[in-house]
Every structure is written in C-alpha cells, then in structure tokens.
Image (tube, helix red, strand yellow):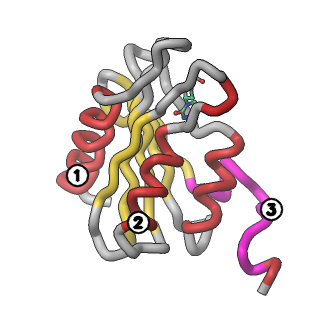
Amino acid sequence: MDEALQSELLATARAARAAAYAPYSNYLVGAALLAEDGRIFGGCNVENAAYPQGVCAEAGAISAMVLAGQRRARAVLVAGGGAHLCTPCGGCRQKLREFCGDPKTFVVMAANENGVQRRWTLEDLLPQSFGPDHLA
Ligand code: THU
C-alpha cells in the first residue's frame, strides 16, 4: 500500500476515533475500511449503558461500507490512543472475514499516536477461518 493511501486511512480512522462514544470504558477506537473500489469508510466504537450492546469501531465501518453498496474490502486500519495498539477483537476479525475476499491478502493495520506500528493479513489474525465459501 502506498504511503498516501495509508495516510488517508490513518486520517479517517483518527477522525472517527475523535467521534467515538465510549463513556464507560473511556477507550476510544476509530477504524478506516478501504473498500475494493477505493472508497474509505470510517467507524467508531459506540457504547451503551447496557454494556453488551456496545459496538466496535470496525463494525461501524463495515456498516457504512455495506450501506454505500460495497461488499468487498481490501484493508482496515484501527487507531487507538497513546502508545497503545488496539488490535481487532475476535468478533471483529470474523466480521471483517465476511467482506475481505481472500484473508491472505486483506491487510489489517494497527496505529497509535505515532502512526501505523503493525501490519498483518487477516489470515495471520484469524487463521483457518470460517467464511462465506463454507456455505456456498
Ligand atoms: N473496541 C473496538 O472498537 N474495536 C476493537 O477491535 C476492540 C475493542 C472497543 C469496544 C469497547 O467500546 C472498547 O473498545 C473497550 O473494549
């Protein structure tokens, strides 16, 4: 991925993070999903007084992409705060799996306040995954 595109993803994820609603955990997360057609969709975590009803940043970005008519993504960048790295939770790894095409080529990036620090494929984070092909 070229540097300009990565910067754009980082800016989108950080802007989304700034909008996060996380009054219970105070753990703000932003995500930027790169769709196959090149569009970028942001999402932030949105918590709830009934704790299990909160949704992750990645899930918000996936919803935005699907609402826009896109069903395939190439990469996601997740932005946490401080020096800490936020990696996608297990549930989000599976949600991303649905729209990733090939887990071996879908890229997951984790950023902190200093920028992107780690990069994996979805296959690295969710090996031997169950996906749409299993039901085809
Ligand atoms: N969170 C995300 O938004 N994405 C992840 O992949 C990890 C966790 C959110 C959920 C909750 O609002 C907060 O971080 C603390 O778990």
- Residue 123 x/y as whole percent: 67, 58
**Does label 1 or label 3 sit earlier along the sequence?**
1
Instruction: Identify the residue position indicated by label 2 in the image.
Output: 67
Q: Amino acid at mark 2?
A: Leu
SS assignment at label 1: helix
Q: Quadrant of residue 78?
A: top left
- Residue 26 x/y as whole percent: 47, 12
Q: Quadrant of the N terminus?
A: bottom left
| Residue at position x 57%, y 55% in the image | 121
Query: In this rendering, is residue 100 above or below 10?
Result: below
Instruction: Identify the residue position indicated by label 3 in the image.
Output: 128
- Residue 46 x/y as whole percent: 48, 31
Around disc 1, counting alpha carbons within 10 Å, would you say few (fewer than 14), some (14 to 19), or many (20 or more)?
Answer: few
Q: Is mark 1 within 8 Å of ligand 1?
A: no
| Rendered image: mark on residue 3 | 1
Around disc 2, counting alpha carbons within 10 Å, would you say few (fewer than 14), some (14 to 19), or many (20 or more)?
Answer: few
- Residue 75 x/y as whole percent: 44, 58
Residue 124 among magenta residues: yes
| C-alpha gap between disc 2 and disc 1 | 27 Å
Q: Nearer the viewer, residue 74 or 24?
A: 24
The image quadrant where one finds ligand 1 is: top right
Q: Amino acid at mark 1?
A: Glu
Q: Amino acid at mark 3?
A: Gln
What's the magenta region? 121-133
| Residue at position x 69%, y 29% in the image | 52
